[in-house]
Image (cartoon, rainbow, N blue to C red):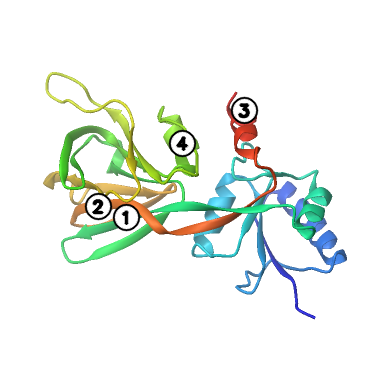
Amino acid sequence: MKEKYINILMNSNFESKKTSKELMKKLSDRGYNPTTTFSENAELTICIGGDGTFIRSIHKSNFSQIPMVGINTGHLGFYQEISSDKIDEFIDDYSNGNYTIEELKLIGAEVFTKNRSHILTGLNEIALKAKNSKIIHMNIYINRNHLEKFSGDGVLVATPSGSTAYNFSLRGALVHHSLEVMQLTPIAPINSAAYRSLSSSIVIPGNYIISLIPEKRYINSSLLLVDGEEFFFSGLKKINLKLSNKSIKKLIFSQDSYWNNLKSKFL
């Protein structure tokens, strides 16, 4: 008989540990083999916590192709579709195949420095800012076409699924995750007699290349934020961003969950 492994990933808060213990017992009773040690042979990964836990799990698993689903024990939980009080219903639906699998596109960045290049991947967004909360000046190109010389706190490029996160707090638009686009959103842009920067988001086809080129004085004082994690590169020259060929798989138990989430989380 084939072992039906299910990965259980969680944060360290009390409610998540309590939910994990309950979930593992119920899965075992139904013939599954739950494990808190990540297995590449698992058929499903269950993430218990909030959206931060979900995103960290995606990165720690190196964007594994094992389908994921989230149980919410956090505050917002936009990625976390299942309530902790509906575990029995979730196991029934999963065992009976009452779900669909959707793919969430990732965003990729090729970071060019003086001596080499680096590849970074994000689920929600990648942002370029100056260190120590200073103003940054950069040139922005779309498919080698100069768009603007930006001045402000920084620039964020979000995926559709990430449009509800940092992007939304910057007054960016909400974009449905089925669309293969990126959103370029300014962070506190400066508009004055000296500086002119776009003050609203731009939605760009996912296969286009967005190039961010900081002015020379910022090549050693810029920060890249990938899903909230900071990266520093000495001698930063240019960043090219576009939707990645990679994606993650997420279980969906209701075709209306996206709209229900928007209403319940934001209205």
Q: Is residue 35 left or right of residue 68?
A: right
Please tell me whether mark 3 sits on a helix, a strand or a loop: helix
- Give the residue at the far bottom of this rendering: 1
How many neighbours does mark 2 have within 10 angstroms: few (below 14), some (14-19), or many (20 or more)? many
x, y percent for residue 27 = 81, 62
Q: Of the two numbered discs 4 and 1 on the same chain, state the one appearing first in sequence.
A: 1
* Residue, disc 1: 109
* Residue, disc 3: 263
Whether residue 246 can be seen here: yes
Viewer-proximal residue, 160 or 97? 97
Please tell me whether mark 2 sits on a helix, a strand or a loop: strand
Q: CA distance from mark 3 to mark 4?
A: 14 Å
Please tell me whether mark 4 sits on a helix, a strand or a loop: loop
How many neighbours does mark 3 have within 10 angstroms: few (below 14), some (14-19), or many (20 or more)? few
Whether residue 11 can be seen here: no
The circle on residue 239 is: 2
In this picture, is 193 found above or below 24? above
Q: Given contact means CB atoms under 8 Å apart, are the residues at marks 2 and 1 in contact?
A: yes
* Residue in the image at 84% along x and 69% along y: 31
* Residue, disc 4: 175
Q: Of the two numbered discs 4 and 2 on the same chain, state the one appearing first in sequence.
A: 4
Q: Is residue 104 left or right of residue 263?
A: left
Q: Given contact means CB atoms under 8 Å apart, are the residues at marks 3 and 4 in contact?
A: no
